[in-house]
Image (cartoon, rainbow, N blue to C red):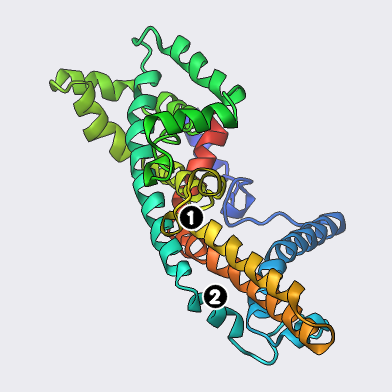
Amino acid sequence: MSQATQATAIPAAKVSSSDIPWNKHVRQKQTVSDWVINIVIATLMVAVILAILYPLWFIIIASISDPKLVATGRVTMFPRGVQMGGYQRIFEDARIWTGYRNTLIYSFVGTALNMAVTLPMAFGLSRREFKPRRVILFLLTFTMFFSGGLIPSYLLFKEVGLLDTMWVFILPSALSVWNLIIARSFFETSIPEDLHDAAQIDGLGYFGYFWRIVLPLSSAIIAVIALYYFVGHWNDYFTGLIYIRTTNKQPLQVVLQSILLSNQSAQNTATFGDTAQQARQVADQIKYGVIIVSTLPLLILYPFLQKYFNKGVMIGAIKG
């Protein structure tokens, strides 16, 4: 019998797909210790989620509940004695709509200018053939740790005519060095250099390569940086407090602060007894309502950018 005949005569061992350790349908048997660890991890995750979400949920239900029930601790999980008096007092103030309008203008115009400055500059600093890039990046990074201070900034803005104008919210913060570094790192590590070589063969210059190839491939980092800039403009309280004197140019955050202060003053000037207690309860309800009014637009905007935000953060975490 030949060797080939002997080889075919020997019965081959039947190997099931379940015996392959890397089969995706095979589930490893979990021991008791594995179950304990999984339960502990799940419990910790649920506890962290509740610790994050419950304060926000309490503010929402407290803003629409009876202030007396909130003050006595009878509002815990669900609203009780629903009333919208706090929101009514907030929106009766005409300044709230002016503040919303101003903040939306400052946020959208400021974010557009931020992106127009940050992305091209980050792309230029990411090109290795650009020799002065390390010196320029060092000078930019230096400004993250050292600044002129409040008084020199105030005098400078006064000299250039930025005081009490909308441009004081936009031009001084046209570039964030931190966001510039993030975008530069993304362009260096996530955009293959072969694309630039192919673009040069096709006759594209740097501007065409940046506009037609780099930007369409950078949607994740663009969304992340735009969100950072927009949130920064939306929460900008200090600029309006220091550099703006005209009431109809104040941002939403300053307007909300003035509403809170006026209600606290009314609470302090109220007479003793039930009137003072009622004024304090209404002031607390207005305080909860102010928190919701100031954060609601961001809560609405974030879900639409969440997938890009997560992707951009993961890209930066993996590739450095």
User: Relative to 191, is 250 on the left or the right?
Assistant: right
**Structural crowding at the residue carrying mark 2, measured as other residues with C-alpha within 10 Å and reported as few (<14), some (14–19) or many (≥20):** some
Q: Residue at x 52, y 66 (%)?
A: 296
**Structural crowding at the residue carrying mark 1, measured as other residues with C-alpha within 10 Å and reported as few (<14), some (14–19) or many (≥20):** some
In this rendered view, identify the residue nearer to me: 8 or 162.
Answer: 162
Q: Residue furthest left?
A: 203
- Above or below, comparing residue 257 to residue 17 in the picture: below
**Is the Cβ of the residue at disc 2 closer than 8 Å to that at disc 1?**
no
Q: Residue at x 86, y 59 (%)?
A: 32
Residue 301 in the image, given as x and y percentages of width and height: 45, 60
Q: Residue at x 36, y 51 (%)?
A: 108
Q: Residue at x 28, y 25 (%)?
A: 195
Quadrant (top left/top right/bottom left/bottom right) for the C terminus: top right
Q: Which residue is mark 1?
A: 306
Residue 224 in the image, given as x and y percentages of width and height: 46, 44
Of the numbered discs in the image, which one, if any, rests on residue 276? Answer: none
Going by the numbered disc 1, the residue's amino acid type is: Gln
Element carrying mark 2: helix
Residue 135 in the image, given as x and y percentages of width and height: 46, 10
Q: Is residue 1 visible?
A: no
Residue 191 in the image, given as x and y percentages of width and height: 37, 28
Q: Residue furthest bottom?
A: 81
Quarter of the image where one finds residue 100: bottom left
Which-is-in-front pick, marks 2 and 1?
2
Going by the numbered disc 2, the residue's amino acid type is: Ile
Q: Which residue is mark 2?
A: 90
Element carrying mark 1: helix
Q: Earlier in the sequence, mark 2 or mark 1?
A: 2
Alpha carbon distance from label 2 to label 1 = 30 Å
In this rendered view, identify the residue nearer to me: 269 or 316.
Answer: 269
- Above or below, comparing residue 197 to residue 88 in the picture: above
